[in-house]
Amino acid sequence: MFKRLMMFLTLLGMFGSMQVGMVSTAAADITLPSYAAGGDVKAKIESTGKRVTDTVGLIVAVLCILGIIVSAGFFGTGKADEGKRWLFGSITGLIVGGLAYGIAALVI
């Protein structure tokens, strides 16, 4: 049993070393895609993430301001309960959106 185990480990070692040699020669033929060949990929990803974060933050802010305007309309027409719901939702959206934007700005 021990003899078979040693033979198996020897064969495994031989084939493993062959695989390492094959991988290094295959890796020499790899060409980078066009987005990675131009330079610093990390900077491109960070700038894209910043643009996406800014855009989402702007959309959330605009929707929350529109919600506040709608709540003012409900207050003006005498529907105070509906106005309170819209106002509470809009302010909550502003707070959550602001926190998410701040966390994303720290990460990016």
Image: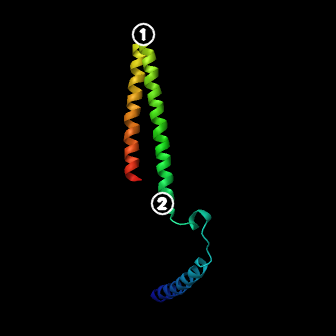
> Label for residue 43?
2
Number of disc labels: 2
Q: Is residue 34 left or right of residue 69?
A: right
Q: Secondary structure at mark 2?
A: helix
**Lower position in the chain sequence, tag 2 or tag 1:** 2
Residue marked by disc 1: 78
- Location of residue 22 by image quarter: bottom right
Residue 6 position, x and y percent, is 47, 88
Badge 1: how crowded within 10 Å, few (<14), some, or many (20+)?
few
Of residues 8 and 32, the one nearer the viewer is 32
Which residue corresponds to the image point at 47% horizontal and 38% vertical from the top-left? Answer: 58
Of residues 28 and 46, the one nearer the viewer is 46
- Location of residue 90 by image quarter: top left
Of residues 65 and 93, the one nearer the viewer is 65
| Type of amino acid at the residue the image marks with label 2 | Ala
Badge 2: how crowded within 10 Å, few (<14), some, or many (20+)?
few
Residue 63 position, x and y percent, is 48, 31
Which residue corresponds to the image point at 46% horizontal and 46% vertical from the top-left? Answer: 53
61 w.r.t. 82: above or below: below
| Type of amino acid at the residue the image marks with label 1 | Gly
Residue 66 position, x and y percent, is 47, 26
